[in-house]
Amino acid sequence: MNTKTSGAIPNGTATLTYGNKRVELPAFKATEGPDVLDIRKLYGDADVFTYDPGFTSTASCESNITYIDGDLGVLLYRGYPIDQLAQHSHFLEVCYLLLNGELPAPKEMESFESTITYHTMVHEQITQLFRAFRRDAHPMAVMVGVVGALSAFYHDSTDITDQRQRKIASHRMIAKMPTIAAMAYKYSLGQPFVYPLNHLGYTENFMRMCFAVPCEEYKVNPVLAKALDTIFILHADHEQNASTSTVRLAGSSGANPFACIAAGIACLWGPAHGGANEAALKMLQEIGTVDRVPEYVKKAKDKSDPFRLMGFGHRVYKNYDPRAKVMRDQTYAVLDELGKHDDPLLKTALELERIALQDDYFIEKKLYPNIDFYSGITLKALGFPTDMFTALFALARTVGWVAQWQEMIEDPQQKIGRPRQIYTGPHRRDYIAAEKRG
Ligand code: CMC
């Protein structure tokens, strides 16, 4: 796999003066976006750390996979704009692109597709793991557990120093994630697991594993399959977001690859990250009708109220999220296909978007709809319950996690991640015997 970083180009230096120390910081040129100042020697030369909670100004790695221009609302996978990929490509081709750096030739695609298909089944003992969970367990809780448990099954693909084993582990994760997500769903319903059918495409197969039952034939609707495949493309990677950084950090210690992906799933679960699609839909349901929208916009602006408009705002996008635009078109396509043009959730969403985009608070803070604003409505219309939404995000993001994990392992600059801190606790003090306290 061609995932090696090529090395950023030197671009002068910056000088930092602190106390009586003067430090030269080398600068490096990015292909797109801001250059970086290399502060690796800062502590050694000036005896200070930098302080950047939430990494708002810190590049944690060099990467050549995904680029986001948050001000312009641009997202590129290996240089290709997300809207072009959503329109012309399909999820497995995007997986190949993210993993290998280039779009596949037809023969390469054929071979990749058959490799992924070959790995779709999970070890039969894994089915027993599901049964250890309560039926009402959140699918993400099940996913964290089961994906982590893959590390106990596939020992022939866990030597991370072996390029071939890394490749097999990557293919296994991409192939098995739909099977595991569908099993989590089936288990929650109390329905039998549906095994993969390899003559179906990746997304069609997943839909069948979710919605088929042994007593009835299930026919995949191509419009709905296209919408879900697009959702997978839109979620496939998003540079150094929280879950991807978690995967890289876990992997930086040389941990088992399946366990690293489980760590990414755990991080994705939070409502400020992957859980936002579920939260956005719940919010639209709570608002309920168009006339209540102004009341909720007011709540979102009230600093004494913790309520935020879910599906609005983004750490990086200070413009319309380019994924949200594609998502909105797919929402219309699905609701049209299902004859649900008058969906009250869509009406509420459109009104909320209209009012918020005219409001000074949202304009000044550059808060625009993000992908999660529309994905929830679409996933609900496709038949998924809200607590499956983040599991679907995890399924799609797996390829991004895997590509970034591989890139990290192959990066000659790679070191175990070990952030520093500014310590503000007590000075050194002596232990006080229990009877002398209080
Ligand atoms: N509703 C109301 N106010 C908001 C919102 C919102 N959704 N988002 C940000 N703000 C305000 C926030 O109160 C703050 O105001 P002030 O400067 O007066 O204190 C300002 O905007 C900046 O917000 P922040 O929390 O400092 O920005 P951040 O970059 O740390 O947070 C975010 C980004 C996505 C966590 C946040 O916008 C948010 O909580 N949005 C709702 C949750 C959501 O939709 N998340 C999905 C993100 S997209 C999926 C993904 O890529 O994972």
Image (cartoon, grey):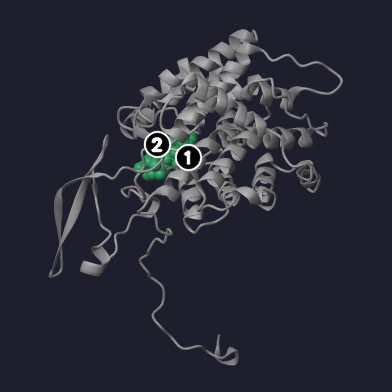
282 versus 87 height, above or below:
below
What residue is drawn where x is 43% and y is 44%?
Answer: 407
Disc 1 and disc 2 in contact, CB within 8 angstroms: yes
Q: Which mark is residue 403?
A: 1
Frontmost residue, 201 versus 13: 201
What residue is drawn where x is 54% and y is 43%?
Answer: 268
Circle 1: residue type = Ala
What residue is drawn where x is 62% and y is 39%?
Answer: 172
Frontmost residue, 108 versus 146: 108
Q: Residues within 10 Å of mark 2 (few under 14, many from 20)?
A: many
Q: Residues within 10 Å of mark 1 (few under 14, many from 20)?
A: many
Q: Quadrant of residue 421?
A: bottom left
Residue 30 shown left or right of residue 428 in the figure: left
Percent from the top left, x then y, of residue 107? 51, 21
282 versus 289 height, above or below:
below
Q: Which of the image's four quarters has the N terminus?
A: top left
Q: Which mark is residue 233?
A: none
Residues at marks 1 and 2, CA–CA distance in whole angstroms: 8 Å
Q: Which of the image's four quarters has the C terminus?
A: bottom right
Residue 170 shown left or right of residue 38 in the figure: right
Q: Which residue is mark 2?
A: 65
Quadrant of the image where one finds ligand 1: top left
What residue is drawn where x is 66% and y is 43%?
Answer: 143
